[in-house]
Image (tube, grey):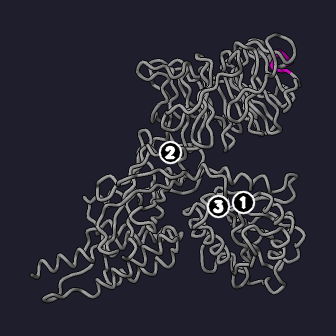
Amino acid sequence: MRPAYSLLIALVLGLGGIAFAQESGIGGFDRDALAAREEFRLGVQAYNRSAFNEAILSFERSLSFRPGEALILDWLGRAYYRSGMEDTALRQWRSAVDSYGPSSRETLVLSSRIETVRNRRSLFSSLDDEIRYVEAGTYPGISGDVRIYRQPTTVLPLDDGSVWVVAYGSNEIVRIDVNGIVRQRQRGPLNGFDRPYDMVRGSDGRLYLSEFRGGRVSILSSQGEWQGYIGSKGRGEGMFIGPQNLTIDDAGYLYVVDYGNKRISKFDPDGAFVLSFGGRSEGFAGLLSPTGIVAREGRIYAADSLARRIYIFDSDGDYLGILISEGLHGPESLTLLDDGRILAADANRLLIIDPNSALIRELGLLGNPRVRIAGARADGNGNILAANFEGDEVSVMTPLDDMAAGLFVQIERVISDNFPRITVEVQVQDRRRRPIVGLDARNFLLTEEGRAAGEQNFLTAAFRSETSDISILLDRSPTALSMQPDLNVAIRDIQAAGSRIVSLISAGEQPLRERIEGTAPSLSALTTAARGSSSSYSLRWRFDMGLRLAATDLLNGAKKRAVVFISSGNLGELAFEQYGLSELAAYLANNGIIFYGVMLGGNPAAEEIRYLCEQTGGQVLSLYRSEGITPVLKDLNTKAVGSYILSYRTGLPTDFGRAYLPVEAEVYLMERSGRDATGYFPPIE
């Protein structure tokens, strides 16, 4: 009976196949294992409530009863990671790998996680000088006998992961999602588009589409519906012969490359003609074959495919000189990247050009037999999309390291309140912590013990949400006390942004939540609470404790979320007394919380504030800009978020709520994939 009894105890107390009980005498069992199992259960439940500090304490106690237990170490690492203590998390995970053994499935998942976290240095990194891009997949223009589109000339990525493909050969624009599925087609007004070539987005969301043979630029809504024209065919002012590439400058002016007239035409935001330039002038022979164009910091950069050069003009069309005179094969499109560098399509190559130094580096190339990259742009998922005109396809170019590392998948939370229906929150990122957006049910597979979970449903994707949460953190230094008028303006601008204000946190000697009534407090109530009393302010105010409290208030809310810190610019002597700067940055970034710093009195921001903004995708804001801070905070609703919610019906035995039930999530996107494994405890029956 002893072996049978031991098996029963192992099943009752089992933890994903790891017994938390050992036989000790006839009919006996290890009481430490019982205690370890109970603490582990409490830790898992706390973690799934986003109570990470509580989870750490429970896992540490569980580990004290069962030292070296792999699954406890794994979960303890998860809790430390979500708490921002990445070095400690890595130590726990390495110990778990040693306990799991080299050939286990758990070791494969955990080793990938360790490698990703260890190699990650910053959030939203730009195109690295050492990165090489390779083809990860295509959006083909033909599938079997079905023609999808013909001769793509450019692409325009959208916030939801899909992309507009401008199809010159089939006279249309086609919106394609990340899985290559056509979601929308637009062919223009009744007379249709006439050889569409390039497309850009204006600051108001409208789209501008050049029509090469039509000799005009179509104005489209943000959804691609035709609204009107700019220009017409001809050689006069504001007219075109073969308009090609487009760009829009910071002031909203549209620049159109007029290929047939060998010039560039400029139009104001209302579509009125302003001027043309690019012809012969003193010191300049004139454009021969103008192609790509991009506006940056008051300068216009224009490529000439025949001269194999890139020229510089000012916004009034005056010639300033040559940026690139050698090393180009046949430049076509130019696109401005977020870091100020220029992405160029050059024959079969993708180039990165630094306009400050004129240095050129090859990012990647297409080796297909038929290649002419007419246009290329970076999307929000870290790829470069290259329109191959000759090959009738759009190539998805991905960093080589990302191809090797795959996707970084994290099951962030398992909710079993409606057991046996289980809800799973899954975060999908690349190895640089950039969110992967645009996924749907086709990209996910949930499994239990290696078998597909039953009744799997894709519920929602956070990138589609238009709601966001903000927690306001208040500088309670004596300097901030003297800046009450600016504080009132900051609160007004934050409320005007339209996010839900979850909490107001005073970062005093003892950080606390200021009381605000209702879910939608009035401006008066917010400003009164934010002002506080004179006793709230102290030289011993605590930034670190206040920031942790503000961030914690956001954990179970909207996935688009931010801490907005209203500051005098300095952080005080006790700013990092308990939590270090890197630990705070990791706590925010690992939980998808953006940090914004609002500077009072026009003061400069401390370097630590700038660091937190850079590491989380936020920025330092000034009340003294003409537009204020509201427009930037409104953009929080459009931020890319790689969080997805799925559900399934479990078929595993629960042992009356005492069993640890495993779940795995696998994610596939073209040639990349990633997976994570976790578990939960069902409700006690």
* Residue at 27% over, 74% down: 14
Asked whether the viewer can see residue 322, the reply is: no
Query: Residue at the spot x=68%, y=57% of the render?
Result: 618
Query: Of callouts 3 and 1, which one flags the residue occurring earlier in the amino acid sequence?
Result: 1
Q: The disc labelled 2 sits on which kind of residue?
A: Leu
| Kind of element beneath mark 2 | loop
- Give the amino acid at mark 1: Ser
Give 460 or 569, whichever is nearer the viewer. Answer: 460
Q: In this figure, which residue is indicated by the disc labeled 1?
A: 499
Mark nearer the N terminus (2 vs 3) = 2
Sooner in the amino-acid sequence: mark 2 or mark 1: 2
Q: Is residue 280 magenta?
A: yes
- Quadrant occupied by the N terminus: bottom left
Q: Nearer the viewer, residue 588 or 145?
A: 145
- Numbered range of the magenta stretch: 276-282
**Numbered tag placed on residue 439 in the rendering:** 2
Residue 310 picture location, percent across and down? 70, 25
How packed mark 3 is, by other alpha carbons closer than 10 Å (few <14, some 14-19, many 20 or more), is many
Nearest the viewer among 416 and 325 is 416
Residue 153: x and y, percent? Answer: 60, 22
Where 485 falls versus 155 (above or below)? below
* Picture quadrant where residue 332 is located: top right
Query: Which dot marks residue 561?
Result: 3
Quarter residue 384 falls in: top right
Report how far apart the C-alphas of labels 3 and 1 lie in the structure.
Answer: 9 Å
Q: CA distance from mark 2 to mark 1?
A: 25 Å
